Image (cartoon, rainbow, N blue to C red):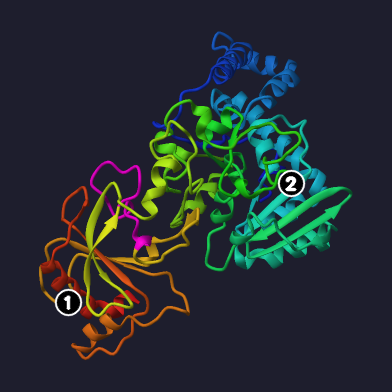
């Protein structure tokens, strides 16, 4: 909250894992890496040489403090953090540069109300996103963003709205968000004061604000900052100043701007697809789903470990993909190859049991495995949306694990079952009809509970890999018994 206003130095904490699936750096990126190494060497030799006693180090730092701050301020925040860990003196200077950079990007909007604003943002579990965070990550404190973009959960909108209006004095000018990102935003306000813009957006009730971050128009816009740290996705492209358009960026008209898309001046080179790789996308194909727990696809840097930015990932069952189609000619999952999969045949399928709303009995059905999976499928690899609607066809962020239940035994019975059975349900909706086949199965045990929507059941064996296996008619009897005894636990 008020951490940025203290004069006491503190070491930044850093969480980042190098991706094993990153594309190879281009020549320009390699040049940047060499330059960083030279900067590290200069800073270390001039200010932290072990040949000098500590008091002489301090003398050198005092004499050349402005030079040191200027060098550090030109670094990206990851490089700044790495340098600040070399010695206590660098930790002090690193903290000074961090605070200086934050004040520079925030003061034009907050003036002397930074403490009040950050305190309210912290209490609301909100984030800052957009150009302010990009400036914190990439550039020096001499760059001043024009917009301050604030994200809050559903419940936190009113408290931030009050601070922006009454404390900061900004006036609301619009409550209409851009159509490209409108589906993932519940409430939106745009404010202005002295040619400065603040936007405030809230997520839908019950949804993580990560859905808004991950539906940004480009990978470079998938950034956010809390009161305790910051995070950005696709670090290999952020470090190379490259921004890849997402499905949302595809919806921005040519004469419009949203994030990095359509910007007249930008620190990023915007790409409309993965063709710039010059090779197959690999696991970075924009059509592949990822989970926020995949730490190789994001970098988190904390300046207050007690208020870690990584807290947002705890119990956040959020998946995302960049796009619904890939246009990279060298990718085996490009749209011209995969479009027949909307009708079949699929490259890999497994057999599950389907209890359809309009069916008179259960059926063994082929469940498609997502493109790109060339090994036996797990629960996260199958396209259950083909049978039970858990998200819209063109969704690019989703929460779905709460729509499935896995059973390793029959509740209430001392019966051993062969394998684990997972039930997938449809996304709750008032329009869902009662499942008649399941109602009939339940009625045989005297249970009058009603299940709405279709249900899909798949089976895994008891082993370390948890791969899904094909189900048989014998498994159908087990599934029927499991559903009839577990309906209270399911809903």
Mark 2 and mark 1 lie on one chain; the one further toward the N terminus is 2
Q: Quadrant of residue 166?
A: bottom right
Prevalent SS, magenta region: loop
The extreme right residue here reads 194
Image height check: is 57 above or below 307? Answer: above
In the picture of the structure, the residue carrying the numbered disc 2 is 256
Q: Which residues are magenta?
A: 369-386
Q: Mark 1 sits on what residue?
A: 481
Residue 252 in the figure: left or right of residue 466: right
Q: CA distance from mark 2 to mark 1?
A: 57 Å
Residue 235 lies, with reference to residue 74, above or below; the image says below
Horizontal arrangement in the rendering, residue 108 relative to residue 183 (left or right): right
In this rendering, does residue 409 appear at all?
yes
Residue displayed at 75% across by 63% down: 175
Task: Please provide percent x and percent y for residue 193.
Answer: 87, 53
Vertical placement of residue 174 versus 286, above or below: below
Q: Position of residue 74 (x, y in %)?
A: 68, 24
């Amino acid at each position: 909250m008020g951490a940025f206003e203290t004069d006491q130095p503190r070491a930044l904490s850093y969480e980042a894992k190098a991706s094993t699936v990153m594309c190879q750096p281009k020549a320009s990126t390699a040049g940047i890496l060499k330059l960083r190494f030279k900067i590290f060497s200069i800073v270390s030799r001039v200010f932290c040489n072990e040949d000098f006693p500590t008091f002489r180090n301090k003398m050198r730092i005092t004499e050349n403090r402005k030079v040191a701050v200027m060098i550090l301020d030109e670094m990206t925040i990851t490089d700044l953090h790495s340098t600040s860990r070399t010695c206590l003196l660098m930790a002090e200077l690193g903290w000074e540069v961090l605070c200086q950079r934050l004040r520079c990007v925030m003061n034009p909007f907050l003036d002397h109300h930074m403490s009040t604003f950050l305190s309210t943002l912290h209490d609301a579990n909100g984030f800052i996103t957009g150009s302010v965070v990009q400036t914190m990550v990439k550039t020096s404190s001499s760059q001043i963003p024009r917009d301050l973009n604030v994200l809050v959960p559903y419940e936190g909108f009113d408290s931030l709205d009050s601070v922006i209006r009454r404390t900061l004095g900004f006036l609301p000018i619009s409550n209409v968000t851009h159509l490209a990102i409108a589906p993932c935003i519940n409430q939106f306000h745009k404010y202005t004061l002295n040619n400065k813009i603040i936007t405030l957006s809230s997520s839908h009730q019950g949804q993580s604000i990560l859905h808004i971050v991950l539906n940004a128009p480009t990978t470079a816009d998938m950034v956010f900052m809390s009161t305790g740290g910051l995070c950005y996705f696709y670090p290999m492209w952020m470090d190379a100043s490259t921004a890849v358009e997402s499905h949302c960026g595809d919806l921005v008209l040519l004469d419009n701007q949203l994030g990095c898309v359509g910007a007249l001046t930008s620190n990023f080179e915007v790409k409309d697809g993965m063709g710039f790789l010059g090779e197959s996308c690999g696991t970075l194909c924009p059509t592949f789903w990822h989970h926020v727990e995949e730490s190789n696809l994001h970098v988190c840097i904390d300046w207050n470990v007690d208020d870690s930015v990584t807290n947002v990932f705890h119990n956040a069952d959020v998946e995302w993909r960049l796009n619904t189609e890939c246009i990279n000619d060298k990718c085996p999952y490009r749209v011209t190859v995969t479009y027949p999969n909307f009708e079949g045949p699929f490259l890999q399928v497994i057999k599950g049991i389907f209890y359809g709303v309009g069916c008179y009995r259960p059926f063994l059905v082929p469940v498609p495995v997502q493109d790109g999976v060339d090994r036996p499928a797990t629960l996260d690899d199958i396209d259950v949306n083909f049978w039970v609607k858990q998200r819209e066809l063109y969704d690019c962020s989703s929460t779905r694990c709460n729509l499935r239940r896995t059973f390793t035994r029959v509740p209430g019975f001392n019966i051993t079952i062969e394998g684990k059975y997972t039930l997938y349900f449809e996304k709750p909706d008032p329009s869902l009809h009662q499942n008649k086949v399941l109602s009939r199965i339940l009625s045989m045990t005297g249970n009058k509970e009603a299940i709405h929507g279709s249900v899909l059941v798949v089976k895994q064996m008891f082993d370390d890999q948890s791969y899904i296996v094909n189900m048989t008619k014998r498994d159908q009897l087990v599934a029927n018994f499991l559903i009839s005894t577990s309906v209270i636990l399911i809903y």
